[in-house]
Amino acid sequence: MRTFHAVSLGVSIFVVSCSQDGSQLKNGTALRGKASLRKIVQVKTTAYCHTERAHRRYGKSNAVDGRLTAAEFNSAAADWSRFPVGTKFRIVGSNRRYVIDDYGSALVGTNTIDLYMPTRREMGNWGSRRVTIELLEVGSYQQSLKILKPRCRIAYVRRMVRDLESQI
C-alpha cells in the first residue's frame, strides 16, 4: 500500500510539473516571449525606501535618471538581465502596479523584485513576501544594456551586462 501511495505521489508531482506553462522564472532564466504576452510569475519581493541608509546617497533618483515614484506605476528594482528596464507588472490580488526603473546590488543573480515604498513605515509593513505577479509588458533588454554599459566599473553592473550580452 505504501508503494502505491509513493508511486501515486510521484506521478502526481510529475503531471503537475509537466502542466506548467514555463512562464515562471527558473534556474536563473530571463523572461522570454512577446512584449505584449501576459505571463504569471511567482517572485520574492522586498521593499525599499529612499530614506533608508543604503539608498540615501541616491535620494529619490532611480537608475534611469528619473525619480522614484509611487503613482500610477510605482517604481521597482530588479536584476535587469531577468526583468529588463521598463517591465510593467501588477501584483495579483491587489491594485498595485509597478515599473522596473531601478536596480540594486543585492538583486543581481536573483528573481527578487524590490518594491519602492514612499515611507519607511510602508517599507517595514511590506517586509519580504512571495507574491504572484502578472507581467503587463516586458521591458527592453537592449535599453537595459545601453544604460548599464557605461556603469561597468561596478562589479554587480558588470555581471548584469555580461548576462544581458549573452541573451541578446
Image (spheres, grey):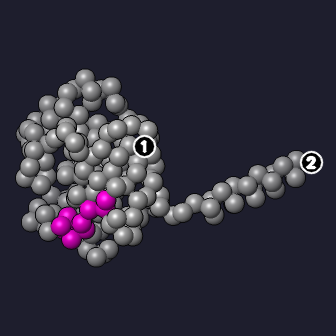
Q: Which of 115 and 70 is in front in this view?
A: 70
Q: Pinpoint residue 126: horizontal percent, then vertical percent.
A: 34, 30
Residue 53 seen in the figure = no
Question: How far is mark 2 from mark 1, CA to CA?
Answer: 41 Å
In the rendered image, the residue lying farthest to the top is 121
Q: Which class describes the residues within 10 Å of circle 1: few (<14), some (14-19), or many (20+)? A: some
For the point 76% across and 51% down, the residue is 9
Q: In this view, does 25 lie to the left or right of 71?
A: right
Q: Is residue 101 above or below residue 122?
A: below
Disc 2: which residue? 1
Q: In this view, does 69 lie to the left or right of 100?
A: left
Q: Which of 163 and 147 is in front in this view?
A: 147
Q: Is residue 24 magenta?
A: no
Q: Which of 143 and 157 is in front in this view?
A: 143
Q: What stretch is highlighted in magenta?
A: 137-145
The mark closer to the camera, 2 or 1, is 1
Tag 1: amino acid: Val
For the point 39% across and 70% down, the residue is 33
For the point 88% across and 52% down, the residue is 4
Q: Quadrant of residue 95?
A: top left
Residue 92 got which mark? 1
Q: Is residue 141 magenta?
A: yes
Q: Pinpoint residue 142: horizontal percent, then vertical percent.
A: 21, 71
Q: Is residue 64 above or below residue 122?
A: below
Q: In this view, does 23 lie to the left or right of 139?
A: right
For the point 28% across and 76% down, the residue is 168
Q: Pinpoint residue 102: horizontal percent, then vertical percent.
A: 19, 50
SS type, badge 1? loop
